[in-house]
Image: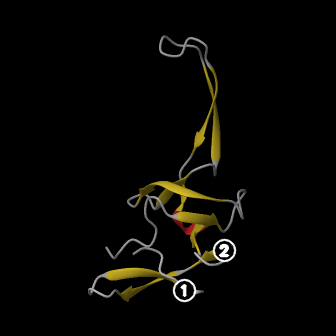
Amino acid sequence: MGAAKIKKGDSVVVRSGKDKGRSGTVLQVLPKEGKVLVAGVNIAVRHRKPSQTNPQGGIDRREAPMAISKVGIADPKTGKATRVRFEAGKDGTKVRVAAKSGEKIDG
């Protein structure tokens, strides 16, 4: 498998679906499933019955995983979604670079 284009902690923008245009931070990446968990995006609502651990019960809202193809890394300059390419850093390491602006994403 190649280098990861989206990592935990990245700022991303949703490109398609019901949350199109919303942005958030990546909480978790699930590479085997091809999914990503983004803070405040793709909120799933579950009605919980009262139990011993949760005697009140109620409505549980939390982020659900979404397809990694639906999100793009936010360009550091503009904040809009961009593709990612890799370049060699000063010390020979791989550095992620925003394709639109040429800004470095990490390091």
Can you give x and y, in whole percent of width and height, for residue 68 in the image? 52, 64
Task: Tell me the residue at 43%/59% (across/down).
Answer: 8
Relative to 71, residue 18 above or below: above
Q: Quadrant of the N terminus?
A: bottom left
User: Residue shown at 52%/13% (left/top)?
Assistant: 51
Q: Position of residue 52 (x, y in %)?
A: 48, 10
Kindly identify the amino acid type of the residue bearing the numbered disc 1.
Ala
Mark 1 sits on what residue?
99
Task: Residue 40: give x, y in percent of width and height.
Answer: 63, 49
Amino acid type indicated by mark 2 = Lys
Any mark on residue 84, and which? none
Distance between the alpha carbons at the discs numbered 1 and 2? 11 Å
Element on which disc 1 rests = loop
> Badge 2 is on which residue?
80
Query: Residue 100: x, y in percent?
Result: 60, 86
- Compared across the picture, whether 62 is left or right of 28 comes to right
Label 2 secondary element: loop
Query: Closer to the N terminus: mark 1 or mark 2?
Result: 2
Locate residue 95 relative to residue 6 in the image: left or right. Answer: left
At label 2, counting other C-alpha atoms closer than 10 Å, the crowd grade (few under 14, some 14-19, many 20 or more) is some
